[in-house]
Image: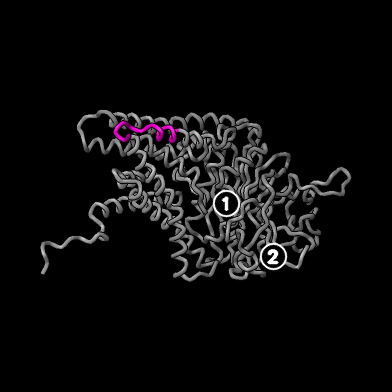
Amino acid sequence: MLDGPAQPRSWIPTRDTLARASASALSGNLMWMAAPDLNWWWLSFIAWIPWLWSIRDLGPKRAFMIGWISGLFSVFVGFFWMTELLTRFAGFPIAAAIPIHLLFAGFQGLQWAIPAALLAWLQRRTGRSTLLLAPLLWAGCEAILPNIFPVYMGFLWAWQPVLIQLAEIGGALTVTLAMVGMNAALYELATGLMRIRSFRGTHRRAMFATLIWFIGVPTYGIIRMAQVDAQIDTAPKMKVAVVQGNFGIRTYSTPGLKPRILRELQLQTKKLQDKGAELAVWGETAYPFSVFFRDSRSDLKKTHPRRVQRHFDIPLIFGTTTRERKRKTNARQHPWNSALVMHRDGKLGDLDGVGETIRWEHSRYDKNHPLYFGEAVPPPIDPDWYLDLIPSASHLNVGEGPNVLEANGYRFGPLICYEDILPRFARDIADEDIHAFVNLTNDSWFGNSPAQGEHLGLSVFRAVEHRKALIRSVNAGASAHIDPAGRVITRTDVTDSDQDGYRGAEGFVADVAMMDPKSRTLYGRFGNLFALLIWLTIATIAWRKRPSAR
């Protein structure tokens, strides 16, 4: 017989825990729905409110676990294209791809978990309001936490240029701070309305903060965009042909299609040259043959079927792989992922005064940040062993640092693939006195999925951070022209020739503002100083306990 009612077992979650977990999951779902692909961006104004409610009055450990749920949902669903990548190209069975994706979501989800734990700890220690702590902690953690795919939540506003002009102050981090600040203000305002009938203390401050955020951010954006537009109007312009090859990974790897891919790129370039283009840009490794060596000086002969410059004669920035001419050992030779400038005369690079030594100072850029496990194998893993295990992967040599590409007398800041979502590296490129950014990308690995929209949305911030236009040539889309105010002036559709068949190349002519290469924004001058100030503020707050906590 039982003596009295049965006691609930400790492993059964309480009603309170279930409610908090559900609220945290809701927050994560609101975030991925607000992302650039689905683009319900207005959800970003409330997306953090369930997360803040779910961790209220909790200790740091429990807040960590509850807050983590938001990250798991947001990343797992928002990045679900990663599962398709693993199954479609790496050959993983779905039973293996899902756990790997879940592990990835768990790691990325620390961006949600760690700020939650710190918020709970600091509120207990200092008694400070969510109004102050939430935006500081979220932005501070976003600045320092390592990510496999760097994501800053400010990209939820990627298609709202008026709201992202703050990026020129401290980078995309500044936009994230404002976004979380708005959520914290609305959260405090809502909880105040539910608890009291009049505004007092923190609730009055919440009303004031709400007005400051929701009026101040767009007002700043409108003023700055008008000022930047005046600079764009007076800047010299160059007509740039952005050529999109529209080939997928399997299409590109089919030997019989390679000549057609090259011919389509050439004919589309000619078509855009006839429309007035003065420079053309092809995507990452868009040139479909491996014929260029580290010491190549010019295009192939005019009669060669793989010649690059055919039907057109404007300068070209194009992606290809480059190799050493002679093998130094019997080991497998690994290439560089390069962007080359081919001038009107078909020459690659610049010769010295004697005409004998080639200089690549401003005519070749080698990718500095290959994507781990897809393009490069991190040490101590043996690259040859890994490539035998996953033949669809590659191992690239790493470039030797930032560089510029010069064409038609202008300096372009090259970014290959996802280097356009690395703020610190893009800042190093901008420090080379560039007129505009140029990004060569291959997103074909992801098929026609939300990945392309997310990538483009993250890249928009480079233009605002440095007030330089960004030209993106993406092999299967979305290619784009982003102006120095962060507006996406032209954007192509994403194609998937591996599923739908190869339809040929397309492109557009962008009238690109060549901005003053010597000009610097606050972020361009001071870089991560804003993030440092955030952490100094957090440390100052944490140092002073409230009297009841001593």
Q: Quadrant of the N terminus?
A: bottom left
* Image spot of residue 316 (x, y percent): 71, 50
Please give the name of the residue rendered at 79% of the width and 55% of the height, measured from the top-left corner: 296
Residue 465 tag number: none
Q: Quarter-wise, where is residue 545 in the image?
A: top left
User: What residue is pinned by disc 1?
Assistant: 418
Of the pair 63 and 302, the residue shown nearer to us: 63
Of the pair 174 and 56, the residue shown nearer to us: 56
Q: Which residues are magenta?
A: 537-550
Amino acid type, callout 1? Tyr
Q: Is residue 505 left or right of residue 85?
A: right
Reply yes or no: does residue 401 show up in magenta: no
User: What residue is pinned by disc 2?
Assistant: 259
| Residue 532 in view here | yes
Q: Is residue 454 left or right of residue 328?
A: left
Could you give the CA–CA distance between mark 2 and mark 1, rounded to whole angstroms?
27 Å
* Image spot of residue 25 (x, y percent): 34, 53
Please name the predominant secondary structure of the magenta segment in the image.
helix
Crowdedness near tag 1: few (<14), some (14–19) or many (≥20) residues, C-alpha within 10 Å: many
